[in-house]
Image (tube, grey):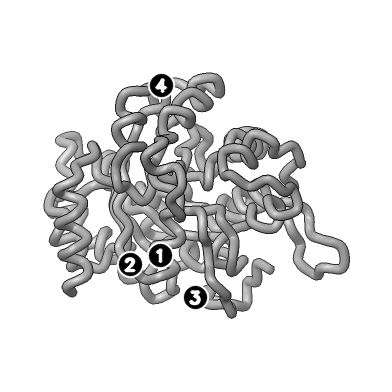
Amino acid sequence: MLDDAAPGREPERSAGPQLNGLTAALHRGTFAVGSWVQVGDHEEARRVGDSSADFVILDMEHLGFSFPELEQTLQWLLSRRNAAQRPTVATPIVRIPSTGAEFSSWMAKQVLDHGAFGLLVPHVTAPDHIAAAARSMRYPPAAGSSDGGGVRGALPARAMRYWGVPDIGEYFARADLWPAASDGELALTVLAESHDAWNAIDDLVRAPGLSAVLWGPGDGGLSLGLRDWDIDHPQLRSHREKVVAAARAAGVAVGAAGAADPFAAIDEGFDFMAIPAWDEDLARRLREHAAGR
């Protein structure tokens, strides 16, 4: 149940997510390392699929929005070397082009029905944006439940195949939002990437259904009038610190979309990181650094 009266979202849980590499790591309290892949970049998808990445953000926001390309990219992520591992190596989270204010439920439904384990929603600036995304990602409530549920339609055959879940009832049970659903495998992650988002961050991180917030310095810098793409610009620092502090106070995971100094980002309090291009050695050192704190 997604409950406005439960800030911090720390419900009673059992084993937690078992398939989603990002949420499984966050549930355990271990630092998650992932990467970015542009949908349609099959070679990079293959490389990340063969890696130790906990998750991968498949980007459909900037360079085209194509479901055939998404399906092909998802298939290239699958690796026979890693197929039996749990959680799923390089768990796909899809960044959709629809912003928080213009959120499209059909887009969420089709991305999830292709097998994605969650969404990254850009340009979120209000709790209502998160509420709309959460409803679009969730199925209607089970019989006898007091939970309001969602509006996602039911045709998950491709998603079941991709997840390796043979029973549709099991898929329906697992395809819910973590951590509000203790064993949910779906991640609703939003980008805090503007001055408006940073001003509203205390409300955003308490929105029911939210899994994690991702700090976005690129568009965030643009919103401040900066034009140098310096993701560690001094004018961004206080906003970054505010986002991290608000997320931690609410018990919500906070991630970095890369960092000028990724080790310093861990020390600042980030819980996960999507490095711009996969680097196995860097990922190993980041995990060791986080484990040693």
Q: Which residue, given by chain and number where applicable, does mark 4 sit on?
A: 40
Question: What crowding class fits label 3: few (fewer than 14 Cα within 10 Å), some (14-19), or many (20 or more)?
Answer: some
Q: Residue at x 53, y 71 (%)?
A: 15
Residue 137 picture location, percent across and down: 64, 48
Q: Which element carries disc 2, helix, strand or loop?
A: loop
Question: What crowding class fits label 2: few (fewer than 14 Cα within 10 Å), some (14-19), or many (20 or more)?
Answer: some
Residue 56 picture location, percent across and down: 38, 42
Q: Which residue, given by chain and number where applicable, does mark 2 sit on?
A: 30
Taking 141 as reference, is 71 left or right? left
Q: Quadrant of residue 154?
A: top right
Instruction: Give the numbered dot on residue 8.
Output: 3
Residue type at mark 3: give it: Gly
Vertically, is 29 above or below 225?
below
Mark 2 and mark 4 in contact (Cβ < 8 Å)? no
Q: Which residue, given by chain and number where applicable, does mark 1 sit on?
A: 26
Vertically, is 108 above or below 197?
above
Mark sitting earlier along the chain (3/1):
3
- Figure quadrant of the C terminus: bottom left
Task: Report, in whole angstroms, how far the alpha carbon at label 1 lies from the one at label 4.
Answer: 28 Å
Task: Report, in whole angstroms, how far the alpha carbon at label 3 lies from the one at label 1.
Answer: 14 Å
Q: Residue at x 46, y 65 (%)?
A: 205
Question: What crowding class fits label 1: few (fewer than 14 Cα within 10 Å), some (14-19), or many (20 or more)?
Answer: many
Mark sitting earlier along the chain (1/4):
1
The residue lying toward the viewer, choosing from 40 and 269, is 40
Residue type at mark 4: give it: Gly
Task: Report, in whole angstroms, how far the alpha carbon at label 4 lies from the one at label 2.
Answer: 30 Å
